[in-house]
Amino acid sequence: MNCIFCEIIQGKRRGHFIYQDETHVGFLDKYPIDYGHALFLPRAHFEKVTDMTPDDVGNLFSKIPKIAKAIIKITNADAFSMAQNNGRAAKQIVPHVHVHIIPRFNDRETLWTKRDIGNDDELKVLAEKIRNCI
């Protein structure tokens, strides 16, 4: 099985990590919907949330408030969106459970489908700031 997120977790691909512990990681989305868009996911590979135990799901979601607060603080966002897709028909592009945490700003209209490739140096600095805030 080839999983981009597993390869990022294993260090085989570059990831701009904002959080890491024994069971979960967070890193910036390479194709962000808006500035500071991050993904939070279990280290263990699960394709869909329905493949996880209730405890696994609870552990995943219980850490999101801490991550989201740091992202909001560092990006000066006014709010955030959170999304978790399951299966290709639901627009899950990478088949590894992950939660999108997307900062939102009152002064701009960001389309959900608009994606830009982040500048690697900018992502590195932003990831460090969020990591230090957590």
Image (tube, helix red, strand yellow):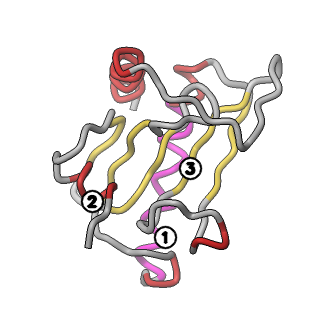
* Crowdedness near tag 1: few (<14), some (14–19) or many (≥20) residues, C-alpha within 10 Å: few
Q: Which residue carries the number 3 mark?
A: 100
Q: In the rendered view, does 20 fall on the left or right side of 64?
A: left
Q: Nearer the viewer, mark 3 or mark 2?
A: 2
Say which residue appears at 33% left-offset and 50% top-offset.
25
- The three-letter code of the residue at mark 3 reads His
* Residue 113, placed above or below residue 128: below
At which x and y percent is residue 47?
A: 43, 75
- The three-letter code of the residue at mark 1 reads Gly
Marks 1 and 2: in contact by CB < 8 Å? Answer: no
Q: Main secondary structure of the magenta part?
A: helix
Q: CA distance from mark 2 to mark 1?
A: 21 Å
Report the magenta residues as a range: 54-70
Where the C terminus falls, by quadrant?
top left
At which x and y percent is residue 54?
A: 48, 82
* Residue 125, placed above or below residue 55: above
* Residue 24, placed above or below residue 29: below
Q: Which residue carries the number 2 mark?
A: 6
Q: Which residue carries the number 1 mark?
A: 58
| Helix, strand or loop at mark 2 | helix
